[in-house]
């Protein structure tokens, strides 16, 4: 349980409820909807079942999480209570602050979960008011899962699906894309060499400009990126209009 600050302040009281290690991350992962115990283990990755059980019990006691038990289910699902859902703006503010002031490329051994990566990417595009002049669908092809990153109605969205008619197809790994996405703008062109991009020249240009990637230079990818995965030389396949 979080320590008592013995300080009469709503911020202190809030931290006493959700200030423990893992608690806010559990809330983050329950915001999209109910999750199973095993789902939460997968998202959090480095938490042990014992610690997850303890944190869930504490959040239940605090009235932030509740069990979503339905007849016929073999596993217990967890969901946020109204009080837990009210923390959405808190998690969103922390995410925005982290993207602006604390983000960096992943380090060796650090797990990059594709769901969290795409969620953060989508939020960042909307927060930074990145807009296109026309609707777009970009297919992000990771080794075991695909996401469609879409722009339409003046906002960005992402979902686990394969776009039937994607304007651009990006083939990479979550680790490589996270590295490109969070690297300083001056480094992105070099790092993007490890990504396969397919599409017409105008659509590829649109994608590259959105992420501040200039025309890719013919330079080797740094060893720190090579260590993430064995890379091929950069490939941009330009389709005919």
Image (spheres, rainbow, N blue to C red):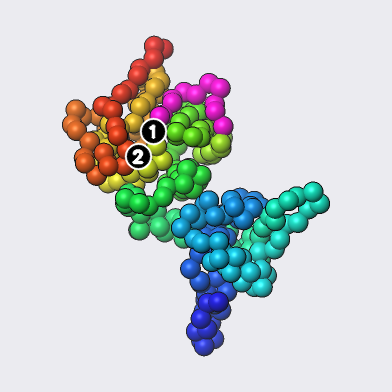
* CA neighbours of label 1 inside 10 A, class few (<14), some (14 to 19), many (20+): some
Residue 50 seen in the current view: yes
Dominant SS in magenta: loop
Q: CA distance from mark 2 to mark 1?
A: 7 Å
Q: In the visual, does 13 lie left or right of 198?
A: right
- State the residue in front, 201 or 219: 219
Q: Residue 87: x, y in percent?
A: 59, 63
From this view, report whether residue 47 is shown above or below residue 227: below
Q: Secondary structure at mark 1?
A: loop
Give the labeled residue for mark 1.
172
- The number of numbered badges drawn on the structure is 2
Q: Quadrant of the N terminus?
A: bottom right
Q: Secondary structure at mark 2?
A: helix
Circles 2 and 1, Cβ within 8 Å, touching? The answer is yes
Q: Residue 9: x, y in percent?
A: 53, 82
Q: In the visual, does 224 lie left or right of 139?
A: left
Find residue 200 and name its label.
Answer: none
Query: In the current view of this chain or complex, which residue is farthest to the bottom?
Result: 6
* CA neighbours of label 2 inside 10 A, class few (<14), some (14 to 19), many (20+): many
- The residue depicted at 39 percent of the width and 37 percent of the height is 173
- The residue depicted at 59 percent of the width and 52 percent of the height is 38
Give the labeled residue for mark 2.
176
Residue 89 seen in the current view: no
Residue 190 lies in magenta, yes or no? Answer: no
- Tell me which segment is drawn in magenta: 161-172
- The residue depicted at 45 percent of the width and 34 percent of the height is 142
């Amino acid at each position: 349980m979080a320590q008592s600050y013995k300080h009469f302040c709503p911020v202190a009281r809030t931290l006493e409820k959700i200030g423990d290690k893992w608690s806010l991350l559990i809330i983050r992962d329950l915001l999209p909807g109910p999750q199973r115990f095993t789902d939460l283990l997968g998202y959090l990755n480095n938490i042990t079942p014992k610690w997850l059980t303890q944190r869930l019990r504490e959040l239940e006691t605090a009235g932030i999480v509740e069990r979503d038990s339905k007849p016929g289910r073999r596993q217990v699902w967890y969901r946020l209570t109204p009080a837990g859902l009210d923390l959405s703006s808190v998690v969103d503010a922390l995410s925005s602050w982290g993207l602006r002031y604390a983000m960096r490329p992943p380090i060796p051994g650090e797990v990059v979960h594709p769901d969290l990566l795409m969620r953060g990417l989508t939020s960042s595009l909307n927060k930074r008011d990145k807009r296109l002049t026309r609707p777009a669908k970009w297919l992000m092809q990771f080794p075991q899962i695909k996401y469609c990153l879409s722009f339409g109605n003046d906002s960005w969205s992402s979902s686990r699906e394969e776009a039937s008619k994607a304007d651009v197809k990006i083939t990479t790994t979550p680790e490589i894309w996270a590295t490109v996405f969070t690297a300083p703008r001056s480094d992105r062109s070099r790092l993007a060499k490890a990504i396969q991009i397919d599409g017409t020249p105008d659509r590829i240009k649109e994608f590259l400009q959105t992420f501040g990637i200039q025309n890719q230079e013919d330079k080797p990818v740094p060893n720190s990126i090579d260590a993430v995965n064995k890379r091929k030389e950069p490939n941009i396949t330009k389709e005919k209009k």
